[in-house]
Amino acid sequence: MKVEDHKRGYPRLAAFVASDPSFSIARRFSYLHTRNLFYRQDRLADIEAQLQALDEKEQTQWYLSSRRDDGNTVRTQLLSSLGDELHEYEKALFAHLRIHTLPSPSSRAKENVQIWMQQYKPLVRREAEFISQSDLLTLDGTEDRGRFDEMVERVVERVLPWDLGYRLLSSKETRIMTSDQNVHIYKPGRLRMLSRVAITLIVVALLLVPMLVLYNVHTGLQRFLTIIFSILGFALIVCVTTKAKKVEIFAATAAYGAILVVFVAESV
């Protein structure tokens, strides 16, 4: 069933979003999660202060030494409600943590959904404003999807003639999901596979090209400059095309530099 076959409104929007994992975009509601967390935190702080005050004013030691025989009804009521308040606070705490670990959508995916919604207007304006908010998240679990994937997608679509780029990234099943020529739905995994092929070729080039240059230059200064610019180029490409952590970038760059230095030492 094509996206356009669904009734206009939430049915068609749901069909469109379900057609591609990258379209699964929703609001994070960071402000509301934070407000709820602070609200639950302060309720617990209030209970804590009340309990401390009741304990300090308690004149009967037996009541403080026995839960079963505690005759202070205010304290027993506070303690009875404490479990529920702690549970709600923990829910708010871990919900806040989970919601902030979900990644933001790529600019390409957000742009695709925005263009589609502006063209078909499935929702009333007030309810469609969510896609223009800044606190968006994606439920797309595609590994390593990022700026490099977007670059590969744009290059494939614009460089290859006719619609070869779209056909390369899509399949027969995804192409029949919509009859709109402006909506491109890709087969899950194809863009990731193409990106991995591209990054593999780049890595090979980053190793072979400096080695060829080092093999053909003979002065120490030329070799030193070749190594310096090669390491800088490698580190820059790793930063731009991957989501590697700082320590991972440092380790990869050090290993790359070590390979070039060993090659120079062996070729001298």
Image (cartoon, rainbow, N blue to C red):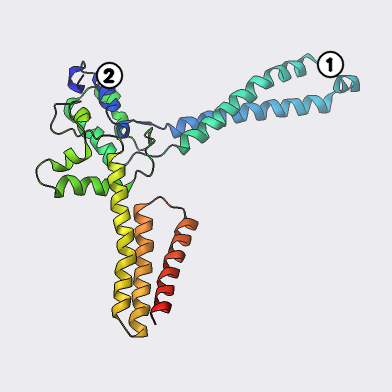
Q: Secondary structure at mark 1?
A: loop
State the image coordinates of residue 261 (x, y, percent, origin top left): 43, 74
Query: Outermost residue, bottom direction?
Result: 219
Q: Residues within 10 Å of mark 2 (few under 14, many from 20)?
A: few
State the image coordinates of residue 32 (x, y, percent, origin top left): 46, 30
Which quarter of the picture shows residue 64? top right
In-image side of 51 versus 95 (left or right):
right
The quarter of the rendered structure image containing the C terminus is bottom left
State the image coordinates of residue 202 (x, y, percent, origin top left): 30, 58
What residue is pinned by disc 2? 10
In-image side of 6 versus 220 (left or right):
left
Sequence-first disc among 2 and 1: 2
In this view, the residue in front, 159 or 29, is 159
Q: Please identify, in this view, whether the residue under mark 2 or under mark 1 is nearer the observer.
A: 2
What residue is pinned by disc 1? 70
The label shown at residue 131 is none
Q: Residue at x 33, y 75 (%)?
A: 226
